Image: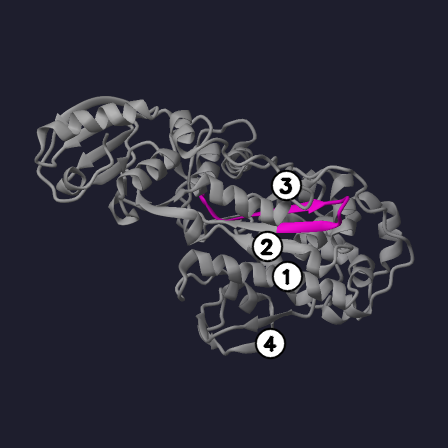
């Protein structure tokens, strides 16, 4: 079948083609698998990436005309632009929408996957950090909620910049790192792109049942190294029913991220990608929603493929970085432990020093900085213990508003109503309260932000003066 000669088109539409291609190379090299939402905003849109016209009329005559061999054998006749030459770190938030929300069609979606990609052009290093969707976060302009609802609120209430911007601001203040750009990627474009690369090589650590979208039936992937086509790679990335829950799922997504990067670099696929830019752009340009500019996208893409594999750090906010809790509507949530998340963030992103300092001060000073209003319920069986505990905590910088009688209890329990991790940490260590007796019952209208429910264990064994 006759091929289109890409050079006349590329010369005439150089910026559009290279930018569209650049975003896919940049995001494919590090982050495409984390975002598999349907192109809700682009499926019937007259314009594609960056608002540029979709150029479907310039595709090859058959949808099957472009295949992996075209990419593997392509050779362009012009030079790519120079790589990004800025001195500042560049960070991008990658998002995918919840497939269940999209299929329900009942309003805005939540994000199902969130991943931070950060590139340091000076040290030629990069980092990938996966963020669990159930992480409890302060959403600017709204009450605290799961971090995956920030996009939903932004779309529902039409805040400036919509869902992507509100999600960006929420993640920025939760993780403590400036975020320059966002990108939301269509999972059908992800599958097609992997197929054009000839698949992605993955070392599957253990047998796993995956359920591909489309006509293919669920199947088991066996342990070992194998090359997955786009639909199986997506199914592997999005599976949440195997052991480890969302934490393990994030790890699989990062496996595919790095597998795509390795495929592009190891097989020197940039020449083929550029040579077939018109057809690739025609197929995939409608699959991304982003605030990246035309010039920045391609320069970042060229920089991305220059970064050595061992210079790419990656990690997942995991069980060691959170406390399990429940929301006011009794949904399971993950309460962040800020210092641990900041330490993880710095280990992944900061090649030349911390992005921002960890929370300063002693444990008591950190509690005082949060300054929650504390209430004490004395169920210890000793009437004087409540008042003595109040006086002791006040001397340490706490703000105990009231002591009242509570139901008799053999154990002391801490209850957090508004999100005060440093206070809980301080009190738990001081009073010997294990994590199993730290409750998170979010209620911004409660009289106290933190409750101490004293039990007889505290009356019988305490550190009161």
What residue sits right under mark 2 in the picture? Answer: 314
Spot occupied by residue 246 in the image (x, y as percentages of width and height)? 43, 56
What residue sits right under mark 1 in the picture? Answer: 258
Q: Which residue lies furthest to the right in this view?
A: 77
- Hey, which quadrant is residue 404 in on the image? top left
Q: Which of 448 and 15 is in front in this view?
A: 448
Spot occupied by residue 7 in the image (x, y as percentages of width and height)? 88, 55
4 or 2: tag closer to the N-terminus: 4
Q: Please name the residue shown 63% across and 41% down the image.
A: 290
* Mark 1 to mark 3 CA distance (whole Å): 22 Å
Relative to 335, is 84 on the left or the right?
right
Residue 12 visible: yes
Relative to 72, is 391 on the left or the right?
left
- The label shown at residue 226 is 4
Relative to 264, is 93 on the left or the right?
left
Asked if marks 2 and 3 touch (Cβ < 8 Å), the reply is no
- The label shown at residue 425 is none
- Hey, which quadrant is residue 406 in on the image? top left
Q: Which of marks 2 and 3 is in front?
A: 2
Magenta extent = 109-127
What residue sits right under mark 3 in the picture? Answer: 290
């Amino acid at each position: 079948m006759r091929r289109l000669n890409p050079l006349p088109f590329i010369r005439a539409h150089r910026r559009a083609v290279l930018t569209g291609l650049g975003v896919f190379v940049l995001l494919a090299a590090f982050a495409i698998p984390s975002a598999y939402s349907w192109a809700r905003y682009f499926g019937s849109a007259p314009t594609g990436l960056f608002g540029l016209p979709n150029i479907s009329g310039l595709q090859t005559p058959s949808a099957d005309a472009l295949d992996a061999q075209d990419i593997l054998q392509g050779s362009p006749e012009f030079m790519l632009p120079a790589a990004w030459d800025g001195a500042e770190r560049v960070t991008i938030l990658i998002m995918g929408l919840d497939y269940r929300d999209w299929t329900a069609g009942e309003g805005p979606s939540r994000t199902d996957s969130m991943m931070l990609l950060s590139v340091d052009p000076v040290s030629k290093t990069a980092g990938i950090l996966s963020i669990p969707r159930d992480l409890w976060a302060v959403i600017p302009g709204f009450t605290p909620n799961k971090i995956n609802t920030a996009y939903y609120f932004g779309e529902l209430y039409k805040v400036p910049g919509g869902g992507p911007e509100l999600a960006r601001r929420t993640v920025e203040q939760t993780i403590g790192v400036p975020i320059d750009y966002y990108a939301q990627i269509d999972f059908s474009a992800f599958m097609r792109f992997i197929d054009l690369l000839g698949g992605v090589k993955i070392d599957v650590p253990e047998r796993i049942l995956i359920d591909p979208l489309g006509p293919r039936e669920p199947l088991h992937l066996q342990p070992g190294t194998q090359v997955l086509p786009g639909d199986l790679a997506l199914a592997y990335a999005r599976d949440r029913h195997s052991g480890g829950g969302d934490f393990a799922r994030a790890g699989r997504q990062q496996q595919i991220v790095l597998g795509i990067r390795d495929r592009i670099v190891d097989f020197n696929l940039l020449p083929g990608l550029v040579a077939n830019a018109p057809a690739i752009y025609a197929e995939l340009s409608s699959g991304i929603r982003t605030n990246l500019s035309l010039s920045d996208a391609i320069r970042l893409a060229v920089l991305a493929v220059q970064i050595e594999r061992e210079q790419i750090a990656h990690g997942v906010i995991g069980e060691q970085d959170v406390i399990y809790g429940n929301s006011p509507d009794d949904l399971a949530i993950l309460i962040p432990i800020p210092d641990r998340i900041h330490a993880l963030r710095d280990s992944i992103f900061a090649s030349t020093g911390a992005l921002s300092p960890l929370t300063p001060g002693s444990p008591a000073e950190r509690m005082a900085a949060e300054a929650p209003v504390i209430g004490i319920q004395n169920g210890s069986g000793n009437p004087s213990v409540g008042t003595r505990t109040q006086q002791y905590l006040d001397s340490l910088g706490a703000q105990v508003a009231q002591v009242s009688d509570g139901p008799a209890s053999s154990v002391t329990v801490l209850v957090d109503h508004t999100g005060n991790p440093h206070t809980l940490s301080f009190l738990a260590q001081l009073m010997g309260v294990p994590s199993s007796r730290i409750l998170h019952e979010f209620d911004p209208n409660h009289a106290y932000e933190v409750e101490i429910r004293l039990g007889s264990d505290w009356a019988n064994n305490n550190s009161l003066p």
